[in-house]
Image (spheres, helix red, strand yellow):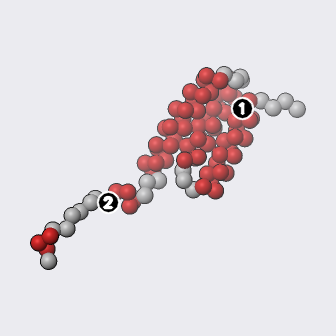
Amino acid sequence: MNIDAWQISLIIAFALAILELLSLSFGLLGMAVGMLAVAAAQYWSEGLSINRDVLIFAVASALAFFTFRMVFRKRSDQQKLQQDDINQY
């Protein structure tokens, strides 16, 4: 049985997604998306290139992380600080 590099990357992506379900922090979800991008690149190019894979992982993970941060942002993070007037009483 011959296991390709893209299959290992796919297994790692699913493991990161499962760990994300346990942690609920959306940090590992971006890394899971990055590993999916690496698995797709390895599948289409039929090979392993460390430099390419690290670059794809870093860029895709960062984009996914910041996208998820914007989409799943808590509404409490958007409150404006309002100062009370001391002459109000």
Q: Amino acid at mark 2?
A: Gln
Of 82 and 7, the residue lying toward us = 82
State the image coordinates of residue 65 (x, y, percent, origin top left). Answer: 50, 43
In-image side of 87 versus 28 (left or right): left
Q: Residues within 10 Å of mark 2 (few under 14, many from 20)?
A: few
Can you identify the residue that label 1 sits on? 6
Q: What kind of element bears circle 2?
A: loop
Can you identify the residue that label 2 sits on? 79
Q: Nearer the viewer, mark 2 or mark 1?
A: 2
The residue sitting at the right extreme is 1
CB-based contact (under 8 Å), mark 2 and mark 1: no
The residue sitting at the left extreme is 87
Q: Amino acid at mark 1?
A: Trp
Q: Residues within 10 Å of mark 1 (few under 14, many from 20)?
A: many
State the image coordinates of residue 72 (x, y, percent, origin top left). Answer: 47, 53
Indicate whether 6 appears above or below 48: below
Mark 2–mark 1 Cα distance, whole angstroms, equals 44 Å
Residue at 52% x, 32% y: name it. 59
Residue 11 visible? The answer is yes
Looking at the rendered image, the quarter that the C terminus falls into is bottom left
Give the quarter of the image for residue 88.
bottom left
Indicate whether 53 appears above or below 20: above
Residue at 27% x, 60% y: name it. 81
In-image side of 89 versus 56 (left or right): left
Q: Earlier in the sequence, mark 2 or mark 1?
A: 1
Q: What kind of element bears circle 1?
A: helix
